[in-house]
Image: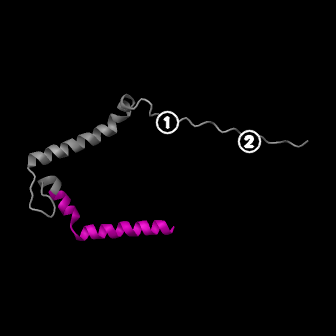
Amino acid sequence: MKKAIITVSLISSLLLILDSANATHWLVLFFLAGVVPGTDILISPIDMLAANATAITIVILRITIWPTIRNIFFPHAEAPIVPKKRAPRHRIAH
């Protein structure tokens, strides 16, 4: 229980710090306009569009096609065979 309370407290404090620094504003500016946070560097719109399209394509392909293609790249990566446990022998007293 202590570990859960500590984890929740750390996550909530991190979210408060990110909210006070306007992290969502900076992320939106980076993904949509190509403004690198904290600098005056601008990435061209075509490069940001290509990066976003590539990232979205990789995520969609990973979710949809990877289970069928996995066997081509990793033919022996199947689930490990776990031996069956024997049932305990019970002695019956007569």
- In-front residue for pair 84/5: 84
Please state the horizontal and vertical placement of residue 24, each as a whole percent of the image.
22, 62
Q: Which residue is identified by label 2?
A: 88
Q: Residue at x 44, y 69 (%)?
A: 6
Under tag 1, what secondary structure? loop
So how many labels did they put on this image? 2
Q: Is residue 36 magenta?
A: no
Q: Which residue is identified by label 1?
A: 79
Which quadrant of the figure has residue 74?
Answer: top left
Give amino acid for label 1. Answer: Ala
Please determine whether, in this image, residue 72 is positioned above or below residue 7.
above
Left or right: where 32 falls relative to 64: left
Give amino acid for label 2. Answer: Pro
Give the class, few, some or many, for how many residues have Cα within 10 Å of label 1's Cα (few <14, many ≥20).
Answer: few
Left or right: where 72 falls relative to 82: left
Disc number for residue 3: none
Left or right: where 94 falls relative to 13: right
